[in-house]
Structures are given as C-alpha cells and as structure tokens.
Amino acid sequence: MRALSIIIFGLVSASCGWILTLTSTVAPNWRTIHNITGQPSDLMLHQGIWDICRSFTGSRDVLCNHEDSEYFNNQIIEVARRMMVASLIVTLIGLGLMTVGTTCWTDKPRIKLAGLGSFLILCSGVLAIIPIAWYNHILKDINSPSTDIRTGYCIILGYIGGLTEFLEGFVIFILLYRCSGGRNRGERPELNIEPKDMTTAPSTSVTRSRASSVPSHIEKQDINFRRDNRPNKISLTL
C-alpha cells in the first residue's frame, strides 16, 4: 500500500536525522579554537554545549572535562541545551506514533496517527535548527581565548539532522494528508456482489403438432382441391 510505504520511508529518514541530531548534541565540537595565547601552537580547544576538550595536532589523546564557567554561562549554551534535548524527545515521540500507525499491528494503517507523528518530527527539526543557527551566527561573538575560531562538525551534523527531520516531517505529513481520503492509499474498494438467482422458470413452450405447423391458407387450398376432384353423382330419375 502507498500509505504504508510512505510511513516506512518516514521512519527510516527520521531515524537518520535523530542520530545526527544526537551526535551534534553530545559531541563537544560546536566550535574549535586554535592558536591560543600562552599555549602550544598545536593545541586545539573543542567546545560544545556540555563539555570542552583539549587535543594536540600530533597526538590522538583528547582531554575532556575542561572547566570554563565563563563560556558555559552564555545564554546560547543554556538555550541550546534545552532545545536540543527537547528536539530529541519530540522526535522519539513522533517515531513512536508513526510506528504504531503502520500495518504491523493493525489491519489498515492509522493515517491520522502517523500524520500526527510526522508533524511532531517536523517540529523537532525546527527545535534543532534554531539553536544551531543561532550559535553559528554568534560563533565569534562568544568569549574565546583566541581569535582563530572555526566551525565544528557538530554544527554541520546538526544542520543536516534538523533539516532532514523538518523536510521528512513536512513531506510525510502532506502525503499522508492527501492519502487520508483513501484516494491514494492503493486500497481496493469493497465490492458487495449479491448472488444472482440462478433458478430458471419452467419452460412454457408448447410443442405444436405437425398439422398445426401447416399454415392455414395451405389447408384451405387442399380442401378446395379435394372438393373439385370428387366424382359427380348423377341421379337418374325414372
């Protein structure tokens, strides 16, 4: 069924968007800071919304749990935390509703329930895009120990995940709304075919005799011919 295919596609794409958003939320790489004053030149500072890590260019060792109260006291950090967590929760609720709306548990897909789930996923995409776009906009305005500030990979992953959820929710919601009338579901209408009465009435045809099958005008001609050929009786009077 077309509606079922749409719901399955929405589940897959929304799950991918949720994973990208989760990675963007927990990873400490919303921005990277290089060439820090008074520090080795190969030192890099990775700042996220939950943690700050330090690493060196020639080493794979990463040291996290770096304290920076001045950075975490910025308004954008608190807003980003709440909105990203809310986006993850709303996405899970939307996925749950879309899963219940499939035909795995019901005879027919619950279009309205799945449509509500897709709308929630659309909203979760908006919740993820807003803090990421805001953070990226004021990236260099947030206090930093260096002026060499670069965008981290979490911003890119957050954009992709949020846009994926938004577009998936919007498209699936519109398609399911169009399918809610049953026109494009691929469902075949139920046909109530009443059994026909196969009993036949007895035949009323009357077999005609051979004599009755002869036309009446032929019978009259035959009678006249017989009358003409009869022998004349001569009555003799004495």
Image (cartoon, helix red, strand yellow):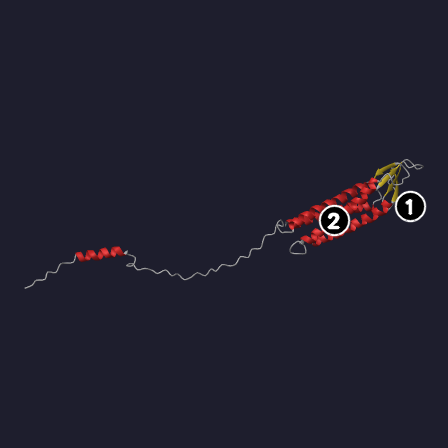
| Mark 1–mark 2 distance (CA, rounded to whole Å) | 34 Å
Q: Position of residue 198 (x, y in %)?
A: 47, 60
Q: Residues within 10 Å of mark 1 (few under 14, many from 20)?
A: few
**Amino acid at dot 2:** Ile
From the viewer's perspective, tell me whether residue 7 is left or right of residue 78.
Answer: left
- The secondary element bearing badge 2 is classed as helix
Q: Residues within 10 Å of mark 2 (few under 14, many from 20)?
A: many
Above or below 195: residue 120: above
- Looking at the image, which is closer to me, 172 or 67? 172
**Amino acid at dot 1:** Ser
Q: Position of residue 162 (x, y in %)?
A: 76, 45
Is residue 62 among the parts visible in the rendering?
no
Q: Residue at x 75, y 53 (%)?
A: 93
- Of all residues shown, which one is farthest toward the bottom? 238
Q: Are marks 1 and 2 in contact (CB under 8 Å)?
A: no
Give the labeled residue for mark 1.
69
Q: Quadrant of the C terminus?
A: bottom left
Which tag, 1 or 2, sits closer to the chain's start?
1
Disc ID at residue 121:
2
From the viewer's perspective, tell me whether residue 125 is left or right of residue 228.
Answer: right
Q: Residue at x 76, y 51 (%)?
A: 92
- The secondary element bearing badge 1 is classed as helix
- Looking at the image, which is closer to me, 80 or 30? 80
From the viewer's perspective, tell me whether residue 185 is left or right of residue 205.
Answer: right
